[in-house]
Amino acid sequence: MSKKIYFLSDFHLGAPDHAASLEREKIIVRFLDEIKNDAAELFLVGDMFDFWYEYKKVVPKGSVRLLGKLAELSDAGIPIHFL
């Protein structure tokens, strides 16, 4: 079986409110968990969060599940490109 390259975008975590964002984040994390065995690379191509940030050391509040899952995939050797 060949590995796949995934392109994901427009999660808009943080909008329109915490409850909706949390539910969407849990769905995204489940999806990432499902693809971890067949992913060759992962491209996050924009609008992951619904706010602008430009600080190199910021962890967006409320997105710990997503960031943890991305760390897990990266630790498993899956290259992640965040655009």
Image (tube, helix red, strand yellow):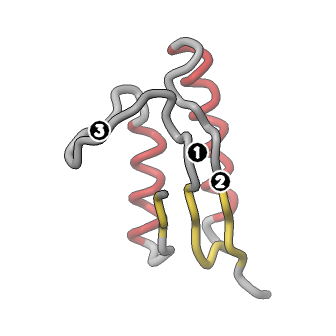
Q: Position of residue 15 (x, y in %)?
A: 56, 19
Label 3 Cα neighbours within 10 Å, binned few <14 / some 14-19 / many ≥20? few
Name, please, the residue furthest toward the bottom: 1
In the displayed structure, does residue 65 sit left or right of residue 39? left
Point out the tag, 3 or 2, that comes first from the N-terminus.
Answer: 2
Secondary structure found at label 2: strand
Location of residue 74 (image quadrant): bottom left
- Please give the residue where the numbered disc 3 appears in the rendered image: 59
Classify the position of the N terminus by image quarter.
bottom right
Q: Residue 33 versus residue 8: which sits nearer the camera?
A: 8
Q: How far apart are the alpha carbons under marks 3 and 2?
A: 19 Å
Residue 57 appears left or right of 66: left
Q: Amino acid at mark 2?
A: Leu
Spot occupied by residue 55 in the image (x, y as percentages of width and height):
23, 42
State the residue at coordinates (58%, 45%).
29
Q: Amino acid at mark 3?
A: Val
Q: Secondary structure at mark 1?
A: helix
Marking on residue 29: 1
Q: Residues within 10 Å of mark 2 (few under 14, many from 20)?
A: some
Q: Which residue is mark 2?
A: 8
Cα gap from disc 3 to disc 1, whole angstroms: 17 Å
Residue 16 position within the rendered picture, expressed as x and y whole percent measured from the top left: 59, 14
Q: Amino acid at mark 1?
A: Val
Mark 1 vs mark 2: which is more N-terminal?
2
